[in-house]
Amino acid sequence: ERVLAAHARAQARFEELDGYRYESRARDALHTLGLEEDDFDLPTSALSGGEKKLVGLAKLLAAG
C-alpha cells in the first residue's frame, strides 16, 4: 500500500511538471539549437564537446 501511495505521488508530480511533453520540448530545443535529428538518439559519449553543451542547453530549455 505504501508503494502504491508513493507511486501515485510520483505520477501526480510527473504530470504537474508536464513530464509527458518533456521529450517533445527537448527535441524541439535540440532542433532549434542546430543539432541534426539523426543525432538525437546517440549517446552523449558520441557527441563532440560543443554538441554536449548544446544538449545541456536543450535540457534547460525543455525543463522550462
Image: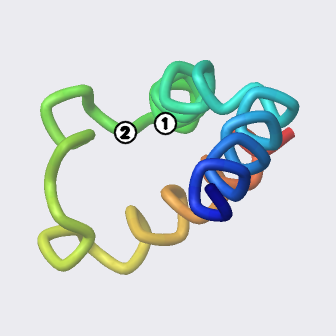
Question: Looking at the rendering, which quadrant does residue 3 occupy?
Answer: bottom right
Q: Which secondary structure lies at badge 2? A: loop
Q: Nearer the viewer, residue 14 or 49?
A: 14
Residue 60 image position (x, y, % from top left): 75, 54
Residue 10 image position (x, y, % from top left): 70, 50
Vertical placement of 44 versus 39: above or below?
A: below
The residue at the point 53 percent across, 70 percent down is 53
Q: Residue furthest front?
A: 1
Q: Amino acid at mark 2?
A: Leu
Vertical placement of 33 versus 27: above or below?
A: below
Q: Amino acid at mark 1?
A: Leu
Q: Nearer the viewer, residue 59 or 2?
A: 2
- Label 2 crowd (10 A; few <14 / some 14-19 / many >=20): some
Mark 1 → mark 2, Cα distance in angstroms: 6 Å
Question: Looking at the rendering, which quadrant does residue 26 occupy?
Answer: top right
Residue at mark 2: 35
The residue at the point 61 percent across, 20 percent down is 21
Residue 14 image position (x, y, % from top left): 71, 39
The residue at the point 18 percent across, 43 percent down is 41
Residue at mark 1: 30
Is residue 46 found left or right of 20 in the rendered image? left
Return the disc, 1 or 2, that comes first in the chain's sequence: 1
In the rendered picture of this protein, how many numbered marks are placed on residues?
Answer: 2
Q: Which secondary structure lies at badge 1? A: helix
Query: Do labels 1 and 2 touch, CB within 8 Å?
Result: yes
Q: Quadrant of the C terminus?
A: top right
The residue at the point 49 percent across, 36 percent down is 30
- Label 1 crowd (10 A; few <14 / some 14-19 / many >=20): many
